């Protein structure tokens, strides 16, 4: 697939029962859409795209048990201690070795948290629309698994501040702005904070994205980055169990 005239889409279902957050970037990193809504709204936008690469902030499927396979374990570096990491996906183990902590994905769908189950449903419905797992040479519409925390670690080179905090939101939006996404510069907030506004609790946060929006945006950016790769994309994990895409060419040994 040649990624020309392509929409780069990010969907964050981690709100669970609350509305999904979905966003899209064009080839020039301009913001096409940023919305909250039910899964049907996100899928309607995906269905309207003739060419798209969708970054989904959720595992593709439940844990397939690869970390219980002795042959797989012997091929890892470091080799896991006996009896350890058996209930993690391969991608989760590999990223946790670099201090990038992903939620553990259980082996049974019923044991997975609500947001993961919504993610499984989202992938299936994307498949029903004709989307196929990246990389696919022939499909014009593809999807890829993204874990936003891992993407931000890779982009920043350090562990980010917690995303629920003001400094975490500023940090995430700033790195996206520095990557030339056509979004507001979050540092302008500090130019607009006055003594009067601070004393009266009037803070200029209207141009600062929230957690779900920032996760969806980095998922869309990761999809855009993959399309711009001329070499082998950085995909962590096993294709059959689920690979996490990263928006960098290589990872550090450890993030701190």
Image (cartoon, grey):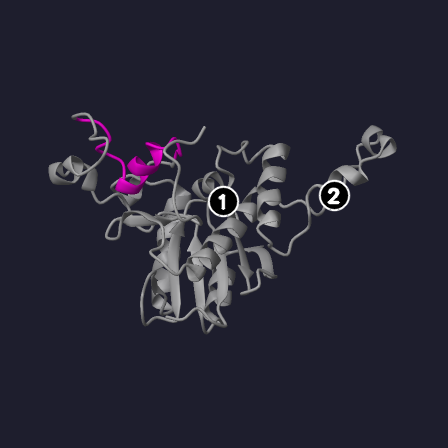
Helix, strand or loop status at disc 2: helix
Task: Name the residue rendered at 43%, 41% in the picture.
Answer: 150
Residue drawn 49% across the image and 44% down it:
15
Q: Residues within 10 Å of mark 2 (few under 14, many from 20)?
A: few
Location of residue 153 with respect to 42 vertically, above or below: above
Residue that numbered label 2 is attached to? 188
For the view shown, which residue lies furthest in the front direction?
Answer: 231
| Residue 19 horizontal/vertical position (percent) | 53, 51
Q: x, y percentage for residue 175?
A: 58, 44
Which numbered marker is on residue 15?
1
Residue 87 within the segment the image draws in magenta: yes
Q: Is residue 50 magenta?
A: no
The quarter of the image holding the C terminus is: top left
Closer to the chain start, of discs 1 and 2, is 1
| Residue for point 56% across, 46% down | 214
For label 1, the SS is loop
Left or right, 51 with reference to 181: left
Residue at (60%, 48%) from the top-left corner? 178
Asked where in the image residue 98 lies, by quadrant, the reply is: top left
Residue 72 visible from this viewpoint: yes
Q: CA distance from mark 1 to mark 2?
A: 29 Å
Q: Which residues are magenta?
A: 83-101
Camera-side residue of 108 and 83: 83
The secondary structure that dominates the magenta segment is loop
Is residue 20 among the parts visible in the rendering?
A: no
Which residue is at the front of the view, 112 or 219? 219
Q: Which mark is residue 105?
A: none
The quarter of the picture where residue 73 lies is: top left
Looking at the image, residue 31 sits to the left or right of residue 204; the answer is left
């Amino acid at each position: 697939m040649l990624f020309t005239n392509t929409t780069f889409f990010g969907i964050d279902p981690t709100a669970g029962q609350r509305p999904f957050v979905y966003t899209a970037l064009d080839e020039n990193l301009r913001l096409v859409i940023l919305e909250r809504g039910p899964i049907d709204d996100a899928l309607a936008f995906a269905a309207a795209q003739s060419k798209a690469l969708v970054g989904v902030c959720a595992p593709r499927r439940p844990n397939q048990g690869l970390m219980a396979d002795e042959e797989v374990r012997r091929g890892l570096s470091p080799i896991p201690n006996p009896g350890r990491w058996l209930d993690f996906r391969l991608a989760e183990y590999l990223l946790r070795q670099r201090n990038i902590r992903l939620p553990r994905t259980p082996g049974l769908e019923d044991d997975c948290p609500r947001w993961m189950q919504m993610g499984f449903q989202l992938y299936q419905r994307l498949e029903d629309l004709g989307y196929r797992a990246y990389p696919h040479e022939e499909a014009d519409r593809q999807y890829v698994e993204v874990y936003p925390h891992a993407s931000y670690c890779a982009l920043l080179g350090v562990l980010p501040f917690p995303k629920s905090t003001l400094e975490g939101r500023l940090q995430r939006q700033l790195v996206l702005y520095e990557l030339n996404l056509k979004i507001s510069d979050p540092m302008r907030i500090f130019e607009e904070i006055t003594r009067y506004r601070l004393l009266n609790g009037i803070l200029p946060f209207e141009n600062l994205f929230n957690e779900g929006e920032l996760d969806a945006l980095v998922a869309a950016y990761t999809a855009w980055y993959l399309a711009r790769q001329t070499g082998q994309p950085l995909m962590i994990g096993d294709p059959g169990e689920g690979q996490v895409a990263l928006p960098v060419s290589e990872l550090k040994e450890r993030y701190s």
